[in-house]
Image (cartoon, rainbow, N blue to C red):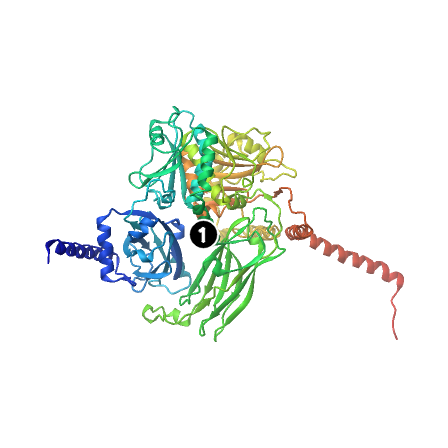
Amino acid sequence: MHNHEFLRRLSAAAMLICLSANVSRAGDFVPADLGTASVQSTLQAASDIPRQMVAFRQTATAMRLEGEGAARELTFYLSPEQVTTAGILRLSYTNAVSVLPDDAMLDVELNGKPLAALPIRSPNGPATHDLPVSAKDLTVGWNKVRLRAKQHHRIDCSVQATYELWTQIDPLVSGFLSGARPRDGDLASLLSVGRNGDGATEIRMIAGNEAPQTILRDGLSLVQTLALVLGREDLSVSVGDVGGSGPGIDLFIGDPSDTKLPQTARDALNAAPRGLFVRQGENGRHVVTMRGSNKSEIQSLLLAAVNGPLLPLIRANKLAMAQTRIDGESPGTHPLSSVGYQTTPFAGRLFQTSFDVVMPADFYPGDYATVDLDLNAATAPGLAPGTQLLVRVNERAVASLVLYDPEGTTLKDKPLELPLRAFHPGVNHVRVLAELPLASDLTCDPAGRDEARSRFLLLEETTVTIPPLARAGRLPDLAAFAGTSFPFKGADSFGLYVDTPTPARLGSALTLLTRLAMSAGHPLPAELKIGRPDARQSTNALIVGAGEEPLELAELSGQKGDRLQLSATDDLVTASVTTGGQISDSQALLDAFQVETRLAHDQLSLKSRASDWIARASTTVNRWLAYKDIGREDVKVDPRDRLISLRQVAAAEGTAVWTYVNASDETLLQQGVAALTRPATWTALEGGEAVIRRSDLELVNRYPETYGFFPITDTSPANLRRLAAAWLSDNFMIYVGLVLALMGGFGWWVGYVVPRKGVRTVE
């Protein structure tokens, strides 16, 4: 054997041993359909070419697998060169301590083919698995990785214990390792950009300290277009005069002859061709340039790129989004298979699956119709009492169905009605859960668990039917703002106001704008302005600031009449009703003292107990009469615990809406915008005001006492009938009044007529 051949084989064997050792530290895995020769050749190729990470498009929230059986689909984009050179799929994860390591597994599929089965046994730190992938298993464009976790609790066999089970894929480390470097000028290479240390996809706009807003105004459409191309819900936009470090995108806009640009920007633009161009920088950084002489030329060059190389990328993102959500814009029936659900027998105690329903911006919720969930499912014989199916909409339980049958049951198009009142404009999260206890669960013997015997089966033929909806734009409504960018989605331009043009404030405003563009599905016609809008202005505005809440917000929030109203007493952190714009420390101390010194219920006198019971009963009745569900009541937030607030009010004139985003300083503004735009928080926005608490970064929504309405665009008899039914469902006391009036009228008629007509007897 020749020396070089011997060295080649020795090198391949050594790499295989190193990979095996690395995997064994995280736990063994079983590769599917990969021979030793294929593994060796793949690893040898990877050792000869530097590896570059291609990140998954999904955020950390979409990479979390919860419960006994959970599935997630992740995607990454490859160029033809990257497919040819093959590579390695890297998955790094951490799991809950409660997961039993003996039988917990993570099944991995790539483009519909089994790739590996990985053990889940890393609660004390991340475990990383490198899975070699051959070129024949890859696809030019989007590749799909399907993960399915099977995990059980160590010591607890109750249904509630299944909520403690989770496995989290790390979005910073996980992805596809490719040996091919993307070509400069290939705009599709943007899809491989990694995330920074905060787990965000950063777009950094390079602008000088002198009048940076001039450059940013020219780049508003471009930064929104990049957001739509990336299709990620963890975008963060920053502004600075130098490029960033680590994974991300540096964006340079303008002409190299512009002296207002920093020198780094002029150098980058001078080295780039005219138009939109991308090249690979250092440390995973992408450098994007848009070279143009003026705003008009930049817009023209951007339009050419959108109609050219960017068009298939944007279309692919829209198609991927449509395949994960049910569109409620038009009435229709949608099978669960249309949102990616796959029928899989389930052998655990708590089955769960979820999907999103996107309602239009002018959807008016009410009890005039229902969203129908027609179940096609089956349960196994021998399940214990308590077997049931639950449906939650936006984390509120709205429907249930008893499934207990000792002999098992089969459901064929079994209707389950979900009230429209539980939905709101924008994105609605629907979860279907089935509690499936067995009598043997009480013994809690992991060794005696029979995974070969399924307990439940939900077929992908299960359908969701959206009824005709009442359409009337309701304000304030932060759900429509976050879900569909209402009222900024139209063709009319709106003002994006920043009180002071500092990098932190400008970056926060641009982050919000890109998030709204993704909700709308297209760039928004925003105009960047510095300062505050005129109170007499009649156009929509998004106002971002740091410092005391502006006086005009306090004035507008107290307006009465037929305009939208927020209650006069501000229980949240917003300072619109207190002297000097802040709730006094004395009042805060008094509230805290009263909470700490309040007597326990059993220490109260009999009279106090009765008064307390009446007050609580009255509150419950009033909440029911006002359709206020548990969890929708106003929650007080300590003024010192406010991180950021978001509020909608009506403009002083016309039908325009002003949306305020405010924090006490720009550091909190940046942190607050990052928390506000997290996928789970963004889709949970509702009502007229929202606050992020500093202590736990939790969202607190607040609902207005009354709503205002935009002019109705659909004046058809059918829509007017649905609106009337919806309004009467909101004001059902009218029905009570009519019934009482009719009963009283009938009693009066009997009392008036009978004495005068007499009573006839029939013999």
Residue 318 position in % (x across, y down): 47, 49
- Residue 709: image quadrant is top right
- Residue 205: image quadrant is top left
Quadrant (top left/top right/bottom left/bottom right) for the C terminus:
bottom right
Name the residue: 56% across, 64% down: 415
Crowding near the residue tagged with mark 1, few <14, some 14–19, many ≥20 C-alpha atoms within 10 Å: some
Residue 692 position in % (x across, y down): 45, 42
Residue 540 left/right relative to 209: right
Name the residue: 27% across, 54% down: 130
Name the residue: 47% across, 54% down: 323
Under mark 1, the amino acid is Ala
Give the structural element (helix, strand or loop) at label 1. Answer: helix
Residue 551 vs residue 616, the one in the foreground: 551
Residue 193 position in % (x across, y down): 35, 44
Residue 526 vs residue 590, the one in the foreground: 526
Residue 624 vs residue 601, the one in the foreground: 624
Report the residue marked by disc 1.
Answer: 320
Instruction: Answer whether residue 110 is visible to the viewer in this image.
Output: yes
- 399 w.r.t. 592: above or below: below
Quadrant (top left/top right/bottom left/bottom right) for the N terminus:
bottom left
Residue 190 position in % (x across, y down): 37, 43
Instruction: Answer whether residue 546 is visible to the viewer in this image.
Output: no
Residue 725 vs residue 39, the one in the foreground: 39
Labels in figure, total? 1
